[in-house]
Image (spheres, rainbow, N blue to C red):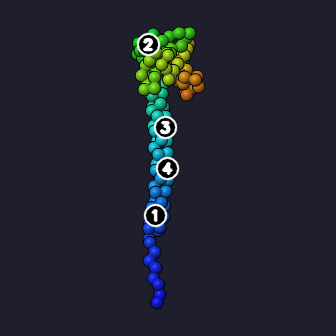
Amino acid sequence: MKKSTVHSRSGLFLMEMILSLLILALTSAVCIQIFAKARIYREEARTWNHIEELTISAGEILEGTDGSPEAFLELMPGGTFSEDQLLYYYDSQWNLCAEEKTVCRFIVRLSGDSKSRQAVLSFKDTRGNTLYEQTIRFPVFGSQKEAD
């Protein structure tokens, strides 16, 4: 008579469980990396949006006024004027702050003559690295005939 042996299937079940947990762990690790990258990209996009907003504001002020530091400080308050440049200090939330708490500096160097107004806009981080720099020029017309 044949001896029938009954093998336990618990070994196979255990292997399937380990394989399932391994796949779950790998998928979780990938998802965590994706979420971490998304946060980094969101912060970078936020920084670029604020830089764009401040650049546009500075350009509109330069175009619509005489380009003096007083006009800038009147329309964009919170800055300081020293050594022929305007300085604005921003914290990590892009709020104006004191120089000691700054994360990003916005520097506006104004220049010009009777024919044009010019500003060099620079954004620098705490280490002094330039994040963005733009030169803006607008012609100055003395009369309507020159503008036409």
Q: Nearer the viewer, residue 62 or 38?
A: 38
- SS category of the residue bearing label 4: helix
CA distance separating discs 3 and 2: 33 Å
- The local secondary structure at tag 2 comes to helix
- Residue drawn at (46%, 50%) of the image: 28
The quarter holding residue 116 reads top right
Mark 1, residues whose alpha carbon is within 10 Å: few (<14), some, or many (≥20)?
few
Distance CA(mark 4)–CA(mark 1):
25 Å
Q: Are marks 1 and 2 in contact (CB under 8 Å)?
A: no
* Mark 4: amino acid: Val
Q: Earlier in the sequence, mark 3 or mark 2?
A: 3
The disc, 4 or 1, on the residue closer to the chain's N-terminal end is 1
Q: Residue at x 50, y 23 (%)?
A: 103
Indicate whether 147 appears above or below 34.
Answer: above
Mark 3: which amino acid? Ile
| Mark 1 or 3, nearer chain start | 1
Viewer-nearest of discs 1 and 3: 1
The label nearer to you, 3 versus 4, is: 4
**Mark 1 and mark 2: span between their CA atoms?**
71 Å
User: Which label number is shown at residue 30?
Assistant: 4
- Residue 145 at x, y percent in the picture: 47, 18
Give whichever of 147, 71 is nearer the camera.
71
Q: Secondary structure at mark 3?
A: helix
Is residue 35 visible in the rendered image? The answer is: yes
The residue identified by callout 2 is 73
- Say what secondary structure mark 1 lies in: helix
Residue pointed to by mark 1: 14
Q: Residue at (41%, 12%) from the top-left corner? A: 74
Query: Looking at the image, is 141 positioned above or below residue 18?
Result: above
Q: Position of residue 129 (x, y in %)?
A: 59, 25
